[in-house]
Amino acid sequence: MSFNFEFVSSREDADVILTEEHAPESVKEILRLGLLAFKPGTLVRVKAVGHIFNNDYQRSNVDLLTEQVTLRTPKAQGS
C-alpha cells in the first residue's frame, strides 16, 4: 500500500483530516500521537509518505512528520 499526503491545519482539524486520508490506520494513529505534543489551536504541518508491504512491494518505508508551524510577522517599526 502506498500513501502520500501533506497538509497544514489547526491541530483539531488535523485529526479530522487524517480520517479522510488514504493510509493504514496504524500510520494515522502514529501521526495522531505526534499531534498530542501541540496545544489546542496550534497550527501544524502533517506529512506522511510511504510504501508498506502488502504483496506489491518487497520493501517497506515510511516518513512521518508532525511539526508546529510558526508564522513569521514583520518586526515592529523602529526596532
Image (tube, rainbow, N blue to C red):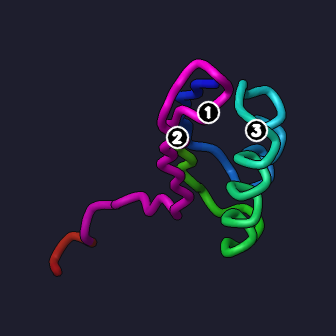
Q: Which mark sits nearer the N-terminus, 3 or 1?
A: 3
Quarter-of-image position of residue 2: top right
The mark lying in front, picked from 3 and 1, is 1
Q: Which mark sits nearer the N-terminus, 1 or 2?
A: 1
Task: Name the residue located 52 percent from the left edge and 25 percent from the top edge.
Answer: 57
Q: CA distance from mark 2 to mark 3?
A: 21 Å
Magenta segment includes 68: yes
Q: How far from the left and from the top, in percent, is residue 13?
A: 77, 44
Q: How many marks?
A: 3
Q: Amino acid at mark 1?
A: Phe
Provide the residue designation for mark 1: 53
Q: Nearer the viewer, residue 18 or 28?
A: 28
Q: Secondary structure at mark 1?
A: loop
Which range of residues does the magenta coloring cover?
48-75
Label 1 with label 2: CB-CB less than 8 Å = yes
Q: Quadrant of the N terminus?
A: top right
Mark 3: few, some, or many residues within 10 Å (few <14, many ≥20)? some
Q: Amino acid at mark 3?
A: Leu
Task: Name the residue located 16 percent from the left edge and 77 percent from the top edge.
Answer: 78
The mark lying in front, picked from 2 and 3, is 2
Q: From the viewer's perspective, is 32 left or right of 68?
A: right
Mark 2: few, some, or many residues within 10 Å (few <14, many ≥20)? few
Q: Secondary structure at mark 2?
A: loop
Provide the residue designation for mark 2: 60
Provide the residue designation for mark 3: 18
Q: From the viewer's perspective, is 20 left or right of 79?
A: right
Q: How far from the left and from the top, in percent, is residue 38?
A: 67, 71
Q: How far from the left and from the top, in percent, is residue 27?
A: 70, 47
Mark 1: few, some, or many residues within 10 Å (few <14, many ≥20)? few
Task: Name the residue located 51 percent from the left edge and 36 percent from the top edge.
Answer: 50
